[in-house]
Image (cartoon, rainbow, N blue to C red):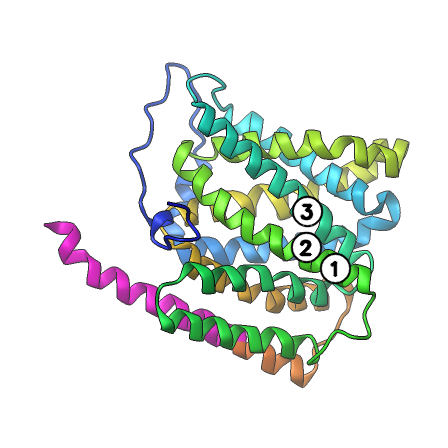
Amino acid sequence: MSTVNSPNAANSTPPAPTPSPGASVPRTPGRFTSLGPVGLVLAGGISVQFGGALAVTLMPRAGALGVVTLRLLAAAVVLLLVCRPRLRGHSRADWGTVIVFGITMGAMNGLFYEAVDRIPLGTAVTLEVLGPLALSVLASRRALNALWACLALAGVFLLGGGGFGDLDPIGVAFALGAGAMWAAYIVFSARTGRRFPQADGLALAMAVAALLFLPLGIAEAGTRLLDPTTIALGSSVALLSSVLPYTLELLALRRLPASTFAILMSLEPAIAATAGFLILGQSLSLTEAAAIALVIAASIGAVRTQIGRGKAALPAEGQ
């Protein structure tokens, strides 16, 4: 059964495969897990939005597709060196999952950066988060989770000023497409986390995404991708927007249902607005502050609901 149809699927953590002799097991994810699944999601959200704000400043140098290419390539190199994933011993289903995860990741990044090249960062994230919100309603079997999703959705539209009619329609379409890919990313990140140890699946998926985007980045940016300053900035974006958040989210999805994770993603517009203020000089209005309060309230409600479910399930699991 897919994660969409079973919100508890991401909660079941299979025994970790035994590493082969000489295999490298990254230590960093082990340290991160002490944050707890909610802390992992929040830390990942902060990292990715500040990385996104930095990416906006890089676009005049390399273009949207060039930035995506640099981000994916640098992230793939780092993850492959740190994780050194095994290429043997995986089933055809394992490889199919990781390839689809890589395609989804590349599409999500490409669509989002094309959006922020046309519309403001905070607005793009506001539209993008509609994908995870839709997933939360589809994945949840409880009416209470649907209520939190509706509350967060109200905050998302309030953050967008109550409407998006004055925006570039192509930018809006790209942002909505990125949201759909984000929902798919949540599903396949959870599946990949169950099939591969540590962050091995993420490293392989990132390599797939980087290879797919390389021709597009070369076509748009050309030799600008070889500029040392551009490479340094692109590597920073990769660490903030890919390596850290994707690793943290993959670890979180091993212990957090997809529906709760998706509602926590409602915090992304608030984090993006903060990053935009600190890095891009974008200020917050009272309406935007009220919207942030709504999405935070929805996220807190989702977490409390999940904690309550976890406590209720403990006696049964202990039998």
Seen from the viewer's position, the closer of residues 306 and 137 is: 137
**What percent of the width, then of the height, locates residue 56?**
78, 54
What SS does tag 3 mark?
helix
Question: Which residue is pictured at 75% across the width and 63% down the height?
Answer: 172
The quadrant holding residue 316 is bottom left
Disc 3 target residue: 109
Q: Amino acid at mark 2?
A: Gly
Asked whether 199 or 195 is in front, the reply is 195
What's the residue at 43%, 22% (across, down)?
Answer: 90
Mark 3 to mark 1: distance in Å? Answer: 14 Å
> Sequence order check: which comes first, mark 3 or mark 1?
3
Looking at the image, which residue is at 46% across and 37% down?
192
Measure the alpha-carbon separation of dots 3 and 2: 10 Å
Give the image location of residue 223, x and y in percent: 89, 31
Tell me if mark 2 has few (under 14), some (14-19) or many (20+) residues whose alpha carbon lies within 10 angstroms of its own: many
Which of the two marks, 3 or 1, is nearer to us in this view? 1
Instruction: Give residue 202's position: percent from left, percent from top.
Output: 52, 36
Q: Nearer the viewer, residue 291 or 165?
A: 165
Callout 2 touching callout 1 (CB < 8 Å): yes
Residue 63 placement (x, y as % from top left): 85, 46
Relative vertical location of residue 200 with respect to residue 240 in this rendering, above or below: above
Q: Which residue position holds label 1?
A: 173
Image: 270 above or below 314: below
The residue tagged with tag 1: helix, strand or loop?
A: helix
Tell me the magenta residue range: 295-319
Contact check, label 3 and label 1, Cβ < 8 Å: no
Q: Earlier in the sequence, mark 3 or mark 2?
A: 3
Circle 3: residue type: Asn
Residue ID for mark 2:
177
Q: Amino acid at mark 1?
A: Ala
Mark yes or no: residue 205 visible.
yes
Name of the residue lying farthest toward the bottom: 286
